[in-house]
Image (cartoon, rainbow, N blue to C red):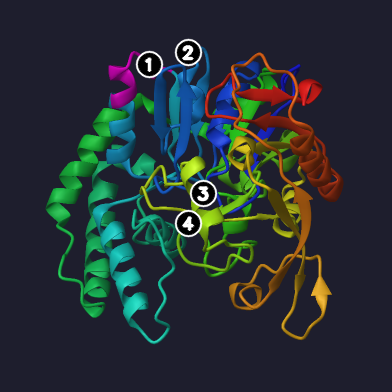
Amino acid sequence: MRPGTGTMNTAITGLQWGDEGKGKIVDLMTSDHDVVVRYNGGANAGHTVVVGEETYALHLMPSGILSPDIQCVIGNGVVIDPTKLLEEIDSLESRGINTNQRLFISDRAHVVLDYHKMLDGALEEFLAGGRSGASIGTTRRGIGPAYADKVLRAPAIRVGDLRYPDVLEERVRIACDLHGEQLASLGWSERPDPEKLIATCRDWGARLGDRIIDTTYFLHDAVKAGKRLLFEGANACLLDVDHGTYPFVTSSNCSALGIPAGTGLPAATVDRVIGIMKAYSTRVGAGPFPTELDNAIGEQIRERGREYGTTTGRPRRCGWLDLVAVRYAAMLCGTTSIACMLLDVLFGLDEVKICTAYRLPDGSTTDRFIPDAHRLSGVEPIYERLPGWDGELDFDGAREQLPDGARRYLDFIEKYLEVPIEVVSVGPERTQTLMASTI
C-alpha cells in the first residue's frame, strides 16, 4: 500500500537543510490525494520530478500539477514572483499539462517585485563586505525582503491587490519610495521604476485572473467535502526561520509548523507527516554544517548525487548523515514516518559514518541539536561507523531487496529516530522507489 492511501491528509516536510527529494515523494503520493497545497517559501525553492524521459523543475508550482485530476493550491504563506509563476504555467502548458481550473492562488499570498530582488542583492553585498564578512547566502530571489514587507504592512502587496488598480498603485509608490531610500543607503545603483511596476502588476492581475481566490475557504470546503489534502513543504525544517540554524535560515516557517499559518487550516487537519531525509547530509550557502566533508568522499557524494541546486545551480556542500539534526526536525514536525532518499549514492563506499552526538567546546557531549549558528559551528560530530556495501545499484523497478549493508544502515536510522521508514528512494525515477513491504 502506498503512503497516503485512505482518507488521510498528509504533510510532506524536509528534515534537513532542503533538497531532500520532496518533489518526488509528492509526485508519488499525489494519486492518493485530491488537492496538493504549497504553504510556504517562494521561487527560492526547487522541486525536481522525473517522469519517464521527462524532467520537470518546479519552483512555485505544487508538484501535484503533473497529475491531471489533481487540484493545486498556492497558499497564503507563499511569496509569489508572478513572472516566475507565469513562466512555469506557460512551460507546463507547452508540454501538454493543463493548469486551467486546477491551479488556485491565495489572494492573501504576498508578491515578490523587482525591488525585493534588488534589496536581496544589496543586503548580501553589504553583509559580505561588512565587519561580519559573511552573507547569509540567499538565492537573491527577493524572498526575505518580500516577507519583511509582509510584516511592515504598509509597503506590502498581496496577490489580491493585483486586481484593484487604486490600491495597487498607492502601495507600489509607497514601496518604491521606501525601498529606493534603502537601496541608496546600501550603495546600490539600481532604483525601482514605479510606473513600470504598476503596469507590470496590472498585467499580472489580468493574466492570473480567476486563479486568484480565497484559498482558505476553498481548503475548508475541500475538507468538509471529504477530499484528501497533501501539503507540500518547500525548503526544510533546519532552515525554518524560528527553529532552524538561525540566522542562516530562510524567511518562512518551512517545517510542518508552518501549515496552519500558511493555509488557514487548523493543525488537527493533518493526519500524518512524512519526513523526507537524504541518506547523507547536504547544505547550500553559508551556515554551520557539523558533518561536512571537504574531501574526496564529499566530492564523490556530490557528483553521484548530482548535488547542484535546482533553483541556482550552485554546488551543494555534502557530508555524512547527521541524525542528531534529523531527530530534532522529526520531533518538531511530529513526523509519523520517514522517506529516505538517494540511498543509491552511498553504494560502493567501504565505510559509512552516522553522526549520533556532538562534542561541545568544553569537552562535554550532547545528543540534542543546537538551532543556533554560533553555537552549532563550535561542535564536533561523534560518529558511529558502519561497513559499506559493494557495487553499483542497477535498479529497474523490479528488485525487491536491498543489499544487507544498506538494510543495516536503514535499520540503524530507524532505531535511532524511533520513527518507521516507509519509503526508500534509489534513483530519481518514480519506479526507483521501495515501499516498506519490500525494503
Are circles 2 and 4 on residues that touch, CB within 8 Å?
A: no
Residue type at mark 1 is: Ile
Is residue 337 visible to the viewer in this orientation of the structure? no
Q: Earlier in the sequence, mark 3 or mark 2?
A: 2
Q: Earlier in the sequence, mark 3 or mark 1?
A: 1
Is residue 123 visible to the viewer in this orientation of the structure? yes
Q: Secondary structure at mark 3?
A: helix
Q: Earlier in the sequence, mark 4 or mark 3?
A: 4
Quickly name the residue at label 3: 300
Quickly name the residue at label 1: 97
Closer to us: 119 or 125? 125
Q: Residues within 10 Å of mark 2 (few under 14, many from 20)?
A: few
Residue type at mark 4 is: Val
Q: Secondary structure at mark 2?
A: loop
* Foreground label between 2 and 4: 4
The alpha-carbon separation of the residues under discs 3 and 1 comes to 36 Å
The alpha-carbon separation of the residues under discs 1 and 4 comes to 31 Å
Image quadrant holding the C terminus, namely: top right
Quarter of the image for residue 435 reads top right
Quarter of the image for residue 183 reads bottom left
Quickly name the residue at label 4: 284
* Foreground label between 4 and 3: 3
Quickly name the residue at label 2: 68
- Find the magenta span and give its range: 91-101
